[in-house]
Protein backbone atom coordinates (compact mmCIF):
# COMPACT_ATOMS: atom_id res chain seq x y z
CA UNK A 1 0.00 0.00 0.00
CA UNK A 2 2.80 2.54 0.73
CA UNK A 3 4.19 1.85 -2.76
CA UNK A 4 0.78 2.60 -4.30
CA UNK A 5 0.60 5.86 -2.36
CA UNK A 6 4.07 6.78 -3.57
CA UNK A 7 3.06 6.09 -7.17
CA UNK A 8 -0.13 8.08 -6.77
CA UNK A 9 1.67 11.03 -5.22
CA UNK A 10 4.33 10.94 -7.92
CA UNK A 11 1.72 10.75 -10.66
CA UNK A 12 -0.27 13.63 -9.17
CA UNK A 13 2.87 15.71 -8.78
CA UNK A 14 3.84 14.98 -12.36
CA UNK A 15 0.42 16.01 -13.65
CA UNK A 16 0.64 19.25 -11.67
CA UNK A 17 4.11 19.89 -13.02
CA UNK A 18 2.86 19.33 -16.56
CA UNK A 19 0.08 21.85 -16.03
CA UNK A 20 2.54 24.38 -14.60
CA UNK A 21 4.98 23.80 -17.41
CA UNK A 22 2.23 24.23 -19.95
CA UNK A 23 1.11 27.52 -18.42
CA UNK A 24 4.66 28.82 -18.24
CA UNK A 25 5.35 27.98 -21.84
CA UNK A 26 2.10 29.26 -23.29
CA UNK A 27 3.84 32.20 -24.88
CA UNK A 28 6.40 30.02 -26.63
CA UNK A 29 5.67 29.31 -30.25
CA UNK A 30 8.11 26.38 -30.18
CA UNK A 31 6.16 24.35 -27.63
CA UNK A 32 2.95 22.42 -28.16
CA UNK A 33 0.79 21.45 -25.20
CA UNK A 34 -1.46 18.47 -25.86
CA UNK A 35 -4.63 18.28 -23.74
CA UNK A 36 -5.42 14.77 -22.51
CA UNK A 37 -8.92 14.20 -21.12
CA UNK A 38 -8.58 11.75 -18.22
CA UNK A 39 -11.65 10.04 -16.74
CA UNK A 40 -9.78 7.66 -14.43
CA UNK A 41 -8.86 8.16 -10.76
CA UNK A 42 -5.20 9.08 -10.33
CA UNK A 43 -4.75 5.88 -8.30
CA UNK A 44 -5.48 3.74 -11.35
CA UNK A 45 -2.45 2.14 -13.05
CA UNK A 46 -3.62 3.29 -16.48
CA UNK A 47 -3.13 6.85 -15.26
CA UNK A 48 -0.12 6.51 -12.95
CA UNK A 49 1.79 3.69 -14.66
CA UNK A 50 0.86 4.01 -18.33
CA UNK A 51 -0.35 7.46 -19.37
CA UNK A 52 1.93 9.48 -17.10
CA UNK A 53 5.13 7.59 -18.02
CA UNK A 54 4.14 7.79 -21.69
CA UNK A 55 3.66 11.56 -21.37
CA UNK A 56 7.08 11.80 -19.74
CA UNK A 57 8.55 9.93 -22.69
CA UNK A 58 6.86 12.28 -25.16
CA UNK A 59 8.37 15.29 -23.39
CA UNK A 60 11.80 13.64 -23.22
CA UNK A 61 11.87 12.47 -26.84
CA UNK A 62 10.76 15.86 -28.16
CA UNK A 63 13.10 17.74 -25.80
CA UNK A 64 10.04 19.42 -24.25
CA UNK A 65 8.82 20.80 -27.57
CA UNK A 66 5.68 18.70 -26.97
CA UNK A 67 4.19 18.20 -23.51
CA UNK A 68 0.96 16.63 -22.27
CA UNK A 69 -1.47 18.39 -19.97
CA UNK A 70 -3.82 16.11 -18.02
CA UNK A 71 -7.34 17.53 -17.76
CA UNK A 72 -10.31 16.26 -15.77
CA UNK A 73 -12.73 14.25 -17.90
CA UNK A 74 -14.34 16.39 -20.60
CA UNK A 75 -17.14 13.85 -21.03
CA UNK A 76 -18.24 10.34 -20.13
CA UNK A 77 -15.75 7.52 -20.90
CA UNK A 78 -17.72 6.30 -23.92
CA UNK A 79 -17.66 9.78 -25.49
CA UNK A 80 -13.88 10.11 -25.66
CA UNK A 81 -13.41 8.93 -29.23
CA UNK A 82 -15.72 11.68 -30.46
CA UNK A 83 -14.17 14.24 -28.11
CA UNK A 84 -10.79 13.64 -29.72
CA UNK A 85 -12.10 13.39 -33.26
CA UNK A 86 -13.91 16.71 -32.85
CA UNK A 87 -10.93 18.46 -31.23
CA UNK A 88 -12.48 18.98 -27.80
CA UNK A 89 -9.48 17.06 -26.44
CA UNK A 90 -6.19 16.36 -28.18
CA UNK A 91 -5.63 12.92 -26.64
CA UNK A 92 -7.74 10.37 -24.76
CA UNK A 93 -7.84 6.76 -23.65
CA UNK A 94 -10.96 4.65 -23.72
CA UNK A 95 -12.24 1.07 -23.89
CA UNK A 96 -13.40 -0.48 -27.17
CA UNK A 97 -16.31 -2.25 -25.45
CA UNK A 98 -17.88 1.05 -24.37
CA UNK A 99 -18.78 1.59 -28.05
CA UNK A 100 -18.41 -2.00 -29.27
CA UNK A 101 -20.22 -1.53 -32.59
CA UNK A 102 -17.58 0.98 -33.65
CA UNK A 103 -14.71 -1.50 -33.21
CA UNK A 104 -15.68 -4.95 -34.50
CA UNK A 105 -12.10 -6.16 -34.93
CA UNK A 106 -11.16 -5.71 -31.25
CA UNK A 107 -13.68 -8.34 -30.18
CA UNK A 108 -11.49 -11.20 -31.39
CA UNK A 109 -8.63 -10.53 -28.98
CA UNK A 110 -10.98 -10.30 -25.99
CA UNK A 111 -12.33 -13.87 -26.22
CA UNK A 112 -11.80 -16.28 -23.29
CA UNK A 113 -8.37 -17.79 -22.73
CA UNK A 114 -5.30 -16.98 -24.84
CA UNK A 115 -2.91 -15.67 -22.13
CA UNK A 116 -2.45 -15.48 -18.38
CA UNK A 117 -0.76 -12.08 -18.58
CA UNK A 118 -1.24 -8.68 -20.15
CA UNK A 119 2.22 -8.07 -21.62
CA UNK A 120 2.29 -10.88 -24.17
CA UNK A 121 -1.36 -10.34 -25.17
CA UNK A 122 -0.95 -6.55 -25.49
CA UNK A 123 2.12 -6.71 -27.73
CA UNK A 124 0.51 -9.49 -29.75
CA UNK A 125 -2.61 -7.34 -30.15
CA UNK A 126 -0.64 -4.42 -31.54
CA UNK A 127 1.16 -6.67 -34.02
CA UNK A 128 -2.08 -8.39 -35.02
CA UNK A 129 -3.77 -5.02 -35.48
CA UNK A 130 -1.03 -3.79 -37.79
CA UNK A 131 -1.04 -7.01 -39.82
CA UNK A 132 -4.77 -7.73 -40.03
CA UNK A 133 -7.07 -5.12 -38.49
CA UNK A 134 -5.73 -1.73 -39.60
CA UNK A 135 -7.31 -2.16 -43.03
CA UNK A 136 -10.78 -1.98 -41.45
CA UNK A 137 -10.27 1.77 -40.95
CA UNK A 138 -11.81 1.90 -37.46
CA UNK A 139 -9.43 4.70 -36.45
CA UNK A 140 -9.54 6.55 -39.76
CA UNK A 141 -10.87 9.75 -38.17
CA UNK A 142 -8.09 9.98 -35.55
CA UNK A 143 -4.42 9.15 -35.03
CA UNK A 144 -4.09 5.81 -33.24
CA UNK A 145 -1.27 5.91 -30.69
CA UNK A 146 -1.65 2.68 -28.76
CA UNK A 147 -3.57 -0.49 -27.97
CA UNK A 148 -3.44 -2.98 -25.14
CA UNK A 149 -5.53 -5.54 -23.26
CA UNK A 150 -5.76 -5.93 -19.51
CA UNK A 151 -4.94 -9.10 -17.62
CA UNK A 152 -7.31 -12.07 -17.24
CA UNK A 153 -10.73 -11.08 -15.93
CA UNK A 154 -12.69 -13.06 -13.37
CA UNK A 155 -16.08 -13.07 -11.62
CA UNK A 156 -16.07 -11.24 -8.26
CA UNK A 157 -18.86 -11.49 -5.69
CA UNK A 158 -19.67 -10.72 -2.07
CA UNK A 159 -20.15 -13.62 0.36
CA UNK A 160 -21.12 -15.84 -2.55
CA UNK A 161 -18.67 -18.46 -3.83
CA UNK A 162 -19.38 -19.74 -7.34
CA UNK A 163 -19.05 -23.50 -7.47
CA UNK A 164 -21.29 -24.56 -10.37
CA UNK A 165 -23.20 -23.16 -13.33
CA UNK A 166 -26.36 -22.93 -11.26
CA UNK A 167 -24.64 -20.36 -9.01
CA UNK A 168 -24.33 -17.99 -11.98
CA UNK A 169 -28.02 -18.08 -12.90
CA UNK A 170 -29.52 -14.61 -12.37
CA UNK A 171 -26.36 -13.16 -10.84
CA UNK A 172 -26.31 -9.38 -11.37
CA UNK A 173 -22.82 -8.27 -12.34
CA UNK A 174 -21.45 -4.97 -13.56
CA UNK A 175 -20.35 -5.36 -17.17
CA UNK A 176 -19.35 -3.47 -20.30
CA UNK A 177 -20.58 -4.26 -23.79
CA UNK A 178 -18.91 -6.49 -26.34
CA UNK A 179 -17.50 -9.79 -25.14
CA UNK A 180 -18.37 -9.07 -21.51
CA UNK A 181 -22.07 -8.74 -22.32
CA UNK A 182 -22.08 -11.80 -24.55
CA UNK A 183 -20.24 -14.05 -22.11
CA UNK A 184 -22.38 -12.85 -19.20
CA UNK A 185 -25.65 -13.50 -20.97
CA UNK A 186 -24.44 -16.90 -22.20
CA UNK A 187 -23.78 -17.93 -18.59
CA UNK A 188 -27.25 -16.68 -17.53
CA UNK A 189 -25.67 -13.75 -15.69
CA UNK A 190 -27.65 -10.51 -15.77
CA UNK A 191 -25.21 -7.81 -16.95
CA UNK A 192 -25.59 -4.32 -15.51
CA UNK A 193 -23.93 -1.88 -17.89
CA UNK A 194 -21.75 0.87 -16.46
CA UNK A 195 -18.25 2.31 -16.97
CA UNK A 196 -15.61 1.11 -14.53
CA UNK A 197 -15.55 4.50 -12.82
CA UNK A 198 -19.16 3.96 -11.58
CA UNK A 199 -18.64 0.43 -10.25
CA UNK A 200 -18.01 1.24 -6.59
CA UNK A 201 -21.37 2.96 -6.19
CA UNK A 202 -23.22 0.08 -7.86
CA UNK A 203 -21.67 -2.50 -5.55
CA UNK A 204 -21.90 -0.39 -2.39
CA UNK A 205 -25.61 0.29 -2.98
CA UNK A 206 -26.37 -3.35 -3.70
CA UNK A 207 -27.48 -2.63 -7.26
CA UNK A 208 -25.23 -5.51 -8.39
CA UNK A 209 -24.08 -8.75 -6.75
CA UNK A 210 -20.56 -8.29 -7.99
CA UNK A 211 -18.41 -7.40 -10.97
CA UNK A 212 -16.60 -8.79 -13.98
CA UNK A 213 -13.08 -7.37 -13.61
CA UNK A 214 -9.38 -8.15 -13.85
CA UNK A 215 -7.51 -8.54 -10.55
CA UNK A 216 -6.07 -5.04 -10.56
CA UNK A 217 -9.38 -3.24 -11.01
CA UNK A 218 -10.90 -4.67 -7.82
CA UNK A 219 -8.27 -2.74 -5.87
CA UNK A 220 -7.95 0.30 -8.15
CA UNK A 221 -11.68 1.00 -7.98
CA UNK A 222 -11.73 0.47 -4.18
CA UNK A 223 -13.86 -2.67 -4.23
CA UNK A 224 -11.51 -4.74 -2.07
CA UNK A 225 -13.27 -3.81 1.22
CA UNK A 226 -16.74 -4.78 -0.07
CA UNK A 227 -16.21 -7.94 -2.15
CA UNK A 228 -14.99 -11.31 -0.85
CA UNK A 229 -14.85 -14.01 -3.54
CA UNK A 230 -13.33 -14.64 -6.95
CA UNK A 231 -14.07 -17.30 -9.55
CA UNK A 232 -10.84 -17.75 -11.52
CA UNK A 233 -10.54 -19.11 -15.07
CA UNK A 234 -7.26 -19.99 -16.88
CA UNK A 235 -6.51 -17.25 -19.38
CA UNK A 236 -9.43 -15.23 -18.06
CA UNK A 237 -13.13 -15.14 -18.81
CA UNK A 238 -12.34 -12.20 -21.12
CA UNK A 239 -9.93 -9.28 -21.40
CA UNK A 240 -11.08 -5.78 -22.31
CA UNK A 241 -9.09 -3.87 -24.92
CA UNK A 242 -8.06 -0.21 -24.66
CA UNK A 243 -6.93 2.46 -27.09
CA UNK A 244 -5.15 5.82 -26.97
CA UNK A 245 -5.85 8.28 -29.76
CA UNK A 246 -4.88 11.80 -30.84
CA UNK A 247 -6.74 14.34 -32.93
CA UNK A 248 -5.56 13.91 -36.53
CA UNK A 249 -5.19 17.62 -37.23
CA UNK A 250 -3.25 18.17 -34.02
CA UNK A 251 -0.87 15.35 -34.91
CA UNK A 252 -0.44 16.58 -38.49
CA UNK A 253 0.40 20.10 -37.24
CA UNK A 254 3.45 18.83 -35.37
CA UNK A 255 6.85 18.85 -37.02
CA UNK A 256 7.99 15.67 -38.76
CA UNK A 257 10.64 15.28 -36.06
CA UNK A 258 8.10 15.46 -33.24
CA UNK A 259 5.64 13.16 -35.00
CA UNK A 260 8.39 10.58 -35.33
CA UNK A 261 9.37 11.02 -31.67
CA UNK A 262 5.79 10.43 -30.49
CA UNK A 263 5.40 7.38 -32.70
CA UNK A 264 8.66 5.97 -31.30
CA UNK A 265 7.21 5.86 -27.77
CA UNK A 266 3.75 4.78 -28.91
CA UNK A 267 2.55 1.71 -30.82
CA UNK A 268 4.34 -1.44 -29.68
CA UNK A 269 6.34 0.56 -27.13
CA UNK A 270 3.09 1.65 -25.47
CA UNK A 271 1.74 -1.91 -25.61
CA UNK A 272 4.84 -3.12 -23.75
CA UNK A 273 4.61 -0.32 -21.22
CA UNK A 274 0.90 -0.96 -20.61
CA UNK A 275 1.19 -4.74 -20.47
CA UNK A 276 4.08 -4.73 -18.03
CA UNK A 277 2.35 -2.15 -15.83
CA UNK A 278 -0.88 -4.15 -15.77
CA UNK A 279 0.89 -7.39 -14.88
CA UNK A 280 2.65 -5.66 -12.01
CA UNK A 281 -0.63 -4.16 -10.82
CA UNK A 282 -2.39 -7.54 -11.05
CA UNK A 283 0.34 -9.18 -8.95
CA UNK A 284 0.18 -6.43 -6.32
CA UNK A 285 -3.63 -6.64 -6.23
CA UNK A 286 -3.48 -10.41 -5.72
CA UNK A 287 -1.27 -9.89 -2.66
CA UNK A 288 -3.66 -7.27 -1.30
CA UNK A 289 -6.72 -9.47 -1.81
CA UNK A 290 -5.08 -12.58 -0.35
CA UNK A 291 -4.06 -10.56 2.70
CA UNK A 292 -7.67 -9.39 3.02
CA UNK A 293 -8.85 -12.99 3.14
CA UNK A 294 -10.41 -13.27 -0.31
CA UNK A 295 -11.49 -16.72 -1.44
CA UNK A 296 -10.17 -17.73 -4.90
CA UNK A 297 -12.20 -20.59 -6.38
CA UNK A 298 -10.92 -22.25 -9.60
CA UNK A 299 -13.74 -22.72 -12.08
CA UNK A 300 -15.20 -26.23 -12.05
CA UNK A 301 -14.80 -28.50 -15.10
CA UNK A 302 -18.48 -27.88 -15.82
CA UNK A 303 -18.00 -24.11 -15.91
CA UNK A 304 -14.78 -24.38 -17.94
CA UNK A 305 -16.47 -26.59 -20.53
CA UNK A 306 -19.34 -24.12 -20.89
CA UNK A 307 -17.00 -21.14 -21.21
CA UNK A 308 -14.99 -22.97 -23.87
CA UNK A 309 -18.14 -23.90 -25.77
CA UNK A 310 -19.42 -20.35 -25.73
CA UNK A 311 -16.02 -18.99 -26.65
CA UNK A 312 -15.99 -21.12 -29.80
CA UNK A 313 -19.50 -19.99 -30.74
CA UNK A 314 -18.60 -16.33 -30.21
CA UNK A 315 -15.40 -16.75 -32.20
CA UNK A 316 -17.32 -18.25 -35.14
CA UNK A 317 -19.82 -15.39 -35.05
CA UNK A 318 -17.00 -12.84 -34.92
CA UNK A 319 -15.06 -14.33 -37.83
CA UNK A 320 -18.22 -14.20 -39.94
CA UNK A 321 -18.76 -10.58 -38.93
CA UNK A 322 -15.25 -9.37 -39.82
CA UNK A 323 -15.25 -11.36 -43.06
CA UNK A 324 -17.66 -8.72 -44.34
CA UNK A 325 -14.87 -6.18 -43.70
CA UNK A 326 -12.46 -8.18 -45.80
CA UNK A 327 -10.62 -9.61 -42.78
CA UNK A 328 -9.72 -13.25 -42.31
CA UNK A 329 -10.57 -13.66 -38.63
CA UNK A 330 -9.10 -17.14 -38.33
CA UNK A 331 -5.78 -15.94 -39.75
CA UNK A 332 -5.83 -12.93 -37.43
CA UNK A 333 -6.36 -15.08 -34.34
CA UNK A 334 -3.63 -17.46 -35.51
CA UNK A 335 -1.28 -14.48 -35.68
CA UNK A 336 -2.44 -13.36 -32.25
CA UNK A 337 -1.66 -16.76 -30.73
CA UNK A 338 1.73 -16.94 -32.48
CA UNK A 339 2.73 -13.48 -31.31
CA UNK A 340 1.65 -14.21 -27.72
CA UNK A 341 3.98 -17.21 -27.77
CA UNK A 342 6.84 -15.13 -29.21
CA UNK A 343 6.56 -12.44 -26.54
CA UNK A 344 6.15 -15.00 -23.76
CA UNK A 345 9.37 -16.68 -24.91
CA UNK A 346 11.42 -13.48 -24.82
Image (spheres, rainbow, N blue to C red):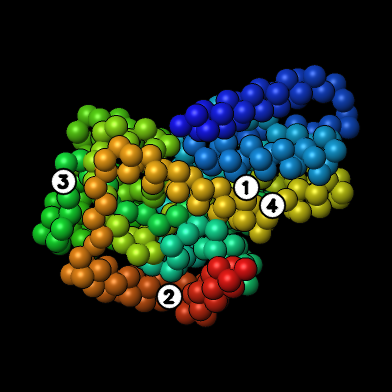
Q: Foreground mark, 1 or 3?
A: 3
- Which dot marks residue 160? 3
**Res. 311 image quadrant:** bottom left
Q: Is residue 199 visible?
A: yes
Query: Residue 290 location in percent, x, y?
Result: 32, 44
Residue under the image location 25 percent in, 30 percent down? 204
Q: Looking at the picture, how far across and down is residue 46, in whole percent? A: 54, 42
Point out the tag, 2 or 4, that comes first from the N-terminus. Answer: 4
Q: Is residue 146 left or right of residue 108?
A: right
Residue 230 drawn above or below residue 182: above
Structural distance between the alpha carbons of marks 4 and 3: 42 Å
For this rendering, which residue is in front, 219 or 81? 219
**Residues at circles 2 and 1 in contact by the CB criterion of under 8 Å:** no
State the CA–CA distance, disc 1 to disc 3: 39 Å
Seen as rendered, the residue at the extreme left is 166
Label located before the other in sequence (3 or 2): 3
Identify the residue under disc 1. 245
Which is more N-terminal, label 1 or label 4?
1
| Secondary structure type for disc 2 | helix
Query: Foreground: 323 or 180?
Result: 180
Q: In the drawing, what numbered circle is on residue 312? A: none
Q: Which residue is mark 4?
A: 266
- Helix, strand or loop at label 3? It is loop
Give the mark nearer the N terminus: 4 vs 3. Answer: 3
Q: Earlier in the sequence, mark 1 or mark 3?
A: 3
Front of the two marks 4 and 1: 4
Dot 2 alpha-carbon crowd within 10 angstroms: few under 14, some 14 to 19, many 20 or more: many
Q: Is residue 82 visible?
A: no
**C-alpha distance separating marks 2 and 4:** 28 Å
The residue carrying mark 2 is: 319
Amino acid sequence: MPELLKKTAAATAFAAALCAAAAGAAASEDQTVLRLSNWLPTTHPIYSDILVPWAESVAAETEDRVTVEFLPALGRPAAHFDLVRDGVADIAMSVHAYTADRFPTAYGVTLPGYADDSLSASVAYWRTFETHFAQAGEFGDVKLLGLWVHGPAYIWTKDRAIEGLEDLDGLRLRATGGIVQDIAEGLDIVPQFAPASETYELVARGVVDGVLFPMESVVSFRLDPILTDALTIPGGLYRDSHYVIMNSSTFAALSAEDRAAIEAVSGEAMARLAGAAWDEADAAARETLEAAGYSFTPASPEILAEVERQGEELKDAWTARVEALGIDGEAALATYVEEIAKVAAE
